[in-house]
Image: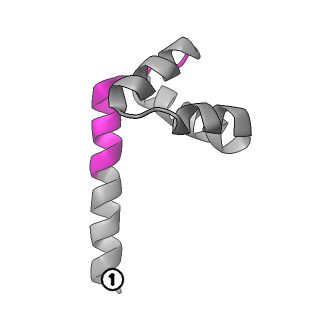
């Protein structure tokens, strides 16, 4: 499942400064997807959209809680 791949990419980027720097250079979602795929991660645009939506929901919930 590609969602697991996205989680793996995030964990790896947190642990590897070089990977983190590569990903930070990506100017948009297309560049991020291409770089991730070149590095062997099988993530999709849908994975990125779901992660973004989850992040927004978490922010809204945190704002409501205080």
- Give the residue at x 51% y 22%: 36
> Does 59 sit above or below residue 64?
above
Secondary structure found at label 1: helix
Residue lying farthest to the bottom in this orientation: 66
The type of colouring in the image is: one colour
Screen quadrant of the C terminus = bottom left
Magenta-colored segment: predominant secondary structure: helix
Asked whether, in this view, residue 3 is left or right of residue 5, the answer is left
Q: Position of residue 29 (x, y in %)?
A: 35, 31
Q: Position of residue 3 (x, y in %)?
A: 41, 30
How many marks the image carries: the answer is: 1
Q: Is any part of residue 40 visible from this angle?
A: yes
Residue with the mark numbered 1: 65
> Picture quarter containing residue 63?
bottom left
Q: Residue at x 65, y 32 (%)?
A: 19
Q: Hey, which quadrant is residue 20 in on the image?
A: top right
Residue 40: x, y in percent?
57, 14
Report the quarter where the N terminus lies.
top left
What residue is shown at x 34% (from left), y 24% (from top)?
30
Task: Judge the density around disc 1: few (<14), some (14-19), many (≥20) Cα neighbours within 10 Å.
Answer: few
The span picked out in magenta is: 40-53
50 in the magenta segment? yes
Q: Position of residue 51 (x, y in %)?
A: 35, 43
- What residue is shown at x 72% (from left), y 40% (from top)? 17
| Depth check, front residue: 65 or 20 | 20
| Left or right of 31 on screen, residue 60 | left
Q: Quadrant of residue 2?
A: top left
**47 within the magenta span:** yes
23 sits to left or right of 62: right
Q: Is residue 1 visible?
A: no
């Amino acid at each position: 499942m590609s969602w697991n791949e996205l989680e793996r990419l995030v964990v790896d980027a947190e642990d590897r400064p070089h990977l983190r720097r590569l990903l930070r250079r990506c100017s948009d979602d297309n560049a991020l997807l291409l770089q991730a795929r070149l590095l062997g991660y099988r993530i999709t645009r849908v994975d990125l959209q779901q992660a973004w939506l989850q992040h927004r929901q978490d922010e809204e919930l945190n704002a409501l809680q205080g």
